Every structure is written in structure tokens, then in C-alpha cells.
Amino acid sequence: MRINKIIVTFLITIFFCNKTTSQEGLPVYSDYLSDNFYLLFPSMAGVSNCTKLRLTGRKQWMDQDKSPNLQTLSINGRLGESRSALGSIIFNDENGYHSQSGAYFTYAHHILFSRSELDLNMLSFGLSAGLIQYKLDESSFLNAGFDPLISGVEQSATDFNIDFGFSYQYLDFYAHASIKNLLNNDGINFNEQGLSYNNLRTYLFSTGYLFTDNTNQWNFEPSFMFAHKDGTKETFLDANLKVYRETDFGRLWAGISYRNSFDGAEFLDSQDQIKTQKLKYITPLIGLEFEGFVFAYTYSYQSNSIVFDNGGYHQLTLGFNFGCRKTRYDCNCPWIK
């Protein structure tokens, strides 16, 4: 009986957490570490010397139907030789009976403070506007009988929203900040009791530095990413370390990321004591860039004490860099070169 109480309490907690955060637009995962800061920070569109095309797929519980999965397709690059850039992101996110899909279009502008383009000293601004469609399929919820709180149909809503961000880069140092989902969206996050969750704003801040050894063949990049969701007051921090190796055939990298939430979900243990569990992820990653082609793989393992399954998230990123200009900046920064 106690075990059932624990499971029910925990499921209810997870259900309501998902109801408030499942329609957040493009989710904040670890895919930004696979050479794709643009997914989180619109100001990074066109920062690189090349136009970047990236395709990412993420999935949990490979043998389960309707398991959490995400696909993104993004492209960004400069407008000719100007300091302006354009970008676009298309995504599809599914989690059980809930799904969301959408498209963003981005404009970014980059301001150089250095006297020449050899020394990287740049401030960037970016604005993304997009449409997101939310769906909740309740068509099979009434198989066990009538429930006045369940409509029994597929609910759908489409909303418009915008993201804004800026980046500052000085030689091998960088800092990024963005506000996602600036506008309130009702979507399908409401119920018969009149509760509505329309504040989807997420504040992101990231900073890092690239250290280089004497041979210029090894680079080390420690970084942090802080996130706060305004509506649910959730806060988490990513601590990351990436190592790059420059070779004759291309660039190799490997790293690890640790995500720790400052908030927890409450549940009853076997002694009927209220406990709190915080979300924790450990994500190792590897990648390769060769002749303009990019391959990266990450695996996110949830290290909480209570989980429904030991399987983690597999994520694969494929990319291609094209339309490259000559190297302009005297830095080892791989996010630009």
C-alpha cells in the first residue's frame, strides 16, 4: 500500500510538472554543446565564418512508443560580407500524448569594437520570431469510462512568440544571454478549475573561456549555463568541460556536462516522510569536424535516486559548414572558426 502511495504521489508530481513546462517551445537540453549555440541564443546566428546547417535527433527509451523525443533542423549564416545574419530553426518535440512543433526565423547583427578584424571584440544582438503548435491527444483517455475533466479529443493550439538575446566575445572569452518566449501564450495549458499557465519565459545565461596549450593542438573550454523559468520558478545550472584536439584531418572534441536543478519534486517515501528530489543529469559528449562535415553524439543519464527507467537520452547531431569565408580573427575559438 505504501509503495502504491509513493508511486501515485510521484506520478502526480511529475504530471503537474509536465503540464506546466511541456509547452515551453524549443526545450533547453544539451544540444547547444554540439557546436550549436544558436539553438538557445539567437545572437549567435552568423557568428561563425561559415554558414552552419545542423540536424539533431534526441530520444529516450529507444524500445518504447511515444517516449520523449526531439528533432531540430537549423541553419544560420552571414548576409554576404555584411555584419548582419539570418537563421531559422524547425523543431518537433513529443512526450507521450503531448507534442509541439514549430519554426523560428532569426535576424542578428554583430558590432565590432576592435580596430581590425584580427582581434575578436564583438557584441551581437539577435531576435527570433516563431509559431509553435501545441497538441494534446486525449482520444484514448476515456477507454476506462467517462470523465468530465477529459474532453476525449485532440486539443490543438498555435501561438506566436519571440526570443531575444545578446552575446559578447573577446578573443577566447564569451558570454551569452537570452530571454525565450517573451510573450504570454495560453496554448493548451488550462483545465476545468480555471488554472492557466501562460508565462513560458525562460532566462538563459552562459559564459566560458578557451585555454590553449603551448602546441596549439589542445584546447580546453570550461563553461557554465544558467537557466530560470519565470512561470514555474525552476532554476538549474549546467557545468561543462570540453576538450578539443586539432589534427591534420580535422577537429576532435569530447566533454562532459553536469546539470543540477535547484528545485525539487516532493514525494512520500516508504516511511510516509515528505522528500524532495532534484533533477540531475550527467552528459558525456564526443564530436568530429572533417572537411566541413560535423558529427556529434551525447548521452544524458539521469542520476536521481528515483527514476522510472535506467535508460538515458541518446542524441545525434549531423552538420555541414559551407560558404566559408577566410579566417578573420586571431583566436582559437572553435565556435567561430
Image: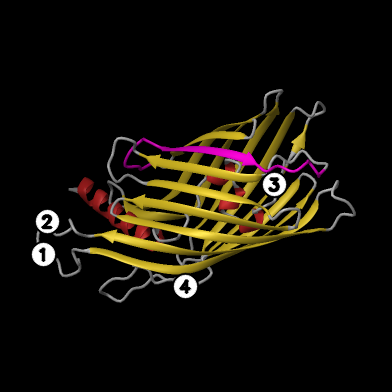
Q: Which residue is mark 3?
A: 48
Q: Nearer the viewer, residue 332 or 76?
A: 76
Q: Is residue 253 above or below residue 264?
A: above
> Contact, CB < 8 Å: mark 2 with mark 4?
no
Q: Which residue is mark 1?
A: 146
Q: Majority secondary structure of the magenta segment?
A: loop
Q: Secondary structure at mark 2?
A: loop
Relative placement, left or right, of 179 versus 93 is: right
Q: How far is the residue under mark 1 from the one under mark 3?
A: 56 Å
Mark with earlier residue (4, 3): 3
Q: How far is the residue under mark 2 from the one under mark 4?
A: 34 Å
Numbered range of the magenta stretch: 305-329
Q: Nearer the viewer, residue 3 or 46?
A: 46
Q: Which residue is mark 4?
A: 184
Q: Which residue is mark 2?
A: 143
Q: Secondary structure at mark 1?
A: loop
- What amino acid is at disc 2? Asn
Q: How far is the residue under mark 1 from the one under mark 2?
A: 8 Å
- What amino acid is at disc 3? Ser
Mark with earlier residue (2, 4): 2
Q: Nearer the viewer, residue 130 or 214?
A: 130
The picture places residue 196, in percent across and down from the top left corner, at 36, 73
> Contact, CB < 8 Å: mark 1 with mark 2?
no
- What amino acid is at disc 4? Asn
